[in-house]
Amino acid sequence: MNDPFRVMIVDDSAVIRGLLKRALESDPAVTVITSVSNGQQALTAVVKHDVEIIVLDIEMPVMDGMTALPLLLKAKPGVQVVMASTLTRQNAEISLRAMKDGAADYVTKPSSTSEIHSADSFKRELVDKIKALAEAGRGGRRGIVARESQKPAAGTVPRKASVVPAPANLKLRPAPTQMPDIIAIGSSTGGPQALFEVLGHIGADLKQPILITQHMPATFTALLAEHIEKSSKIPASEAKDGDAIVPGHIYVAPGEHHMTVERGATGNIIKLNTDPPENFCRPAVDPMLRSMAKIYGSRMLVVILTGMGADGQKGAAVAVDAGASVIAQDEATSVVWGMPGAVATAGLCSAILPLPEIAPYVRKLAMRTAA
């Protein structure tokens, strides 16, 4: 077997540390090499041990998770940090801030130790995220945050060479030839950072509505919409069943609901459902794309950002068959090149771009005159 992925747990509860350790080490590909009770101890431990992933609690004595986060990232460049907390609005807000500040992802801990014992979905989510992040780190990818000097100015046109994927075996479809009527975005692990980057540079004057499915629980998705509006200056909201799809508005799929589109009496509307999860996810990207493809066809632009798994691949294939265009985040700037890699390797993409070049590329398409 390959060298197991090396994890450090930081949590002030000895019981929780033990439960997390057992959950992680139920998979032979993961080993917990150390566990500590606060951020200060974590800073000491991270330089002693060859840590790849840190599971970091938010609320701890001596030094809390938010204080420790930037110090840990500085002390161990390249380490991936997963924030862990119970699901409250305050903790969701803190977790979103942490992801802006460099955390790769988050997990929501069950609210009691008995729930952790019985929560198979939590254990699977925790192990899957740890393994995906560690595999990405060992693959040598440099993470999601590009240096400021590498970012093009909003509204500029990316260099043509950047549209060509680095791996020569990835085949691109023809570039879009018409202005889209709507933009769909799918994302997961690392997605909040990527969404803030793309939407923060796409321009508040875009007329197209933007629909986003990001894998998140309900408390997070409402806050994500608020943060997106602040960073993009574009009106954004967690979608509600029956919402009219209007120009220049961003709709975020609510946690625990698939977001789809239907024709209404006076225009297209959002429809939410609690159908079974797809790709272990609800909301999932695939049902959103399938429904949109039926209505918008070739007037639809799909963007697949960083995330583990392959959610979005089947829906993107339906969209492409209807004439839509797909662009994906490249491997080098993805936290995990699962979702974008799936559409890229399936030959569904018209462009595969570094994260800082996605907003200018989308803007160029969205602002062109109608064909």
Image (cartoon, helix red, strand yellow):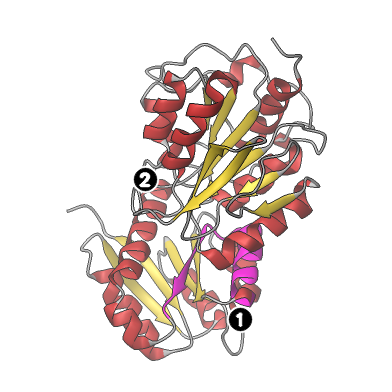
Residue farthest left in this picture: 1
Task: Provide residue 14's location: percent of width, then percent of height.
Answer: 39, 90
Q: CA distance from mark 1 to mark 2?
A: 31 Å
Q: Earlier in the sequence, mark 1 or mark 2?
A: 1
Residue farthest front in this picture: 265
Task: Provide residue 300's location: percent of width, then percent of height.
Answer: 58, 26
User: Residue 313 vs residue 59: left or right?
Assistant: left
Residue at 46% across, 60% down: 256
**Residue flagged by tag 1: what amino acid is it?**
Asp
Q: Secondary structure at mark 1?
A: loop
99 falls in the magenta region: yes
**Residue flagged by tag 2: what amino acid is it?**
Gly
Q: Could you say which is closer to the camera, residue 297 or residue 38?
A: 297
Residue 159 to residue 78: above or below: above
Residue at 76% across, 14% down: 369
Residues in magenta? 90-110
Task: Provide residue 258's location: percent of width, then percent of height.
Answer: 46, 51
Task: State which quadrant residue 318 falls in.
Answer: top left
Residue 26 to residue 327: above or below: below
| Residue 357 appears in the picture as rendered | yes
103 falls in the magenta region: yes
User: Residue 118 vs residue 295: left or right?
Assistant: left
* Residue placed under numbered mark 1 in the picture: 64
Residue 11 to residue 330: above or below: below
* Residue placed under numbered mark 2 in the picture: 309
